[in-house]
Amino acid sequence: MSTLPACPACTSDLTYEDGAGLYVCPECGHEWPVQADTAGEAAKVWRDASGNLLQDGDTVTVIKDLKLKGGGGTVKQGTKVKNIRLVEGDHDIDCKIDGFGAMSLKSEFVRKA
């Protein structure tokens, strides 16, 4: 079973990858770049609890008390977090909170300030 895309010109499944970074269809002779296959992937979009778009460097407010694992205390509701950094993963915000240090938060528990 092939993981290569079908030919966009004739929809043939017999395509192959050329050494020059091209896909080639042996039936119709159509050639297209390999990068065009991955260009269709959408970029990740992060949103807060209210649906506002988040970006690196934003300031957010915690919307509920968050207990820290390991007995480190609780981040209280209303705590402002400045200069966030968005990352891939389950906890998608990396930040530093005064009094607690560096930590990761979920975007569903913050609101853009």
Image (cartoon, rainbow, N blue to C red):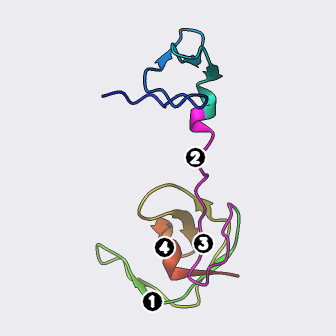
Where 29 falls versus 10 (above or below)? above
Where 104 falls versus 49 (above or below)? above
Q: Is residue 39 magenta?
A: yes
Real-space Cα separation, disc 3 to disc 2, in angstroms = 19 Å
Which badge, 1 or 4, is on the more N-terminal residue?
1
Given contact means CB atoms under 8 Å apart, are the residues at marks 3 and 2 in contact?
Answer: no
Q: Is residue 100 magenta?
A: no
- Taking the image as shown, residue 108 lies to the left or right of residue 61, namely left
Residue under label 1, please give it.
65
Real-space Cα separation, disc 1 to disc 2, in angstroms = 36 Å
Residue under label 3, please give it.
47
Q: Can you tell which mark lies on residue 100?
A: 4
Q: Can you tell which mark lies on residue 41?
A: 2
Type of amino acid under label 4: Phe
**Residue drawn at (41%, 63%), measured in percent from left and top?**
90
How would you classify the magenta stretch by its main secondary structure?
loop
Q: Position of residue 14 (x, y in %)?
A: 43, 20
Q: Position of residue 47 (x, y in %)?
A: 60, 72
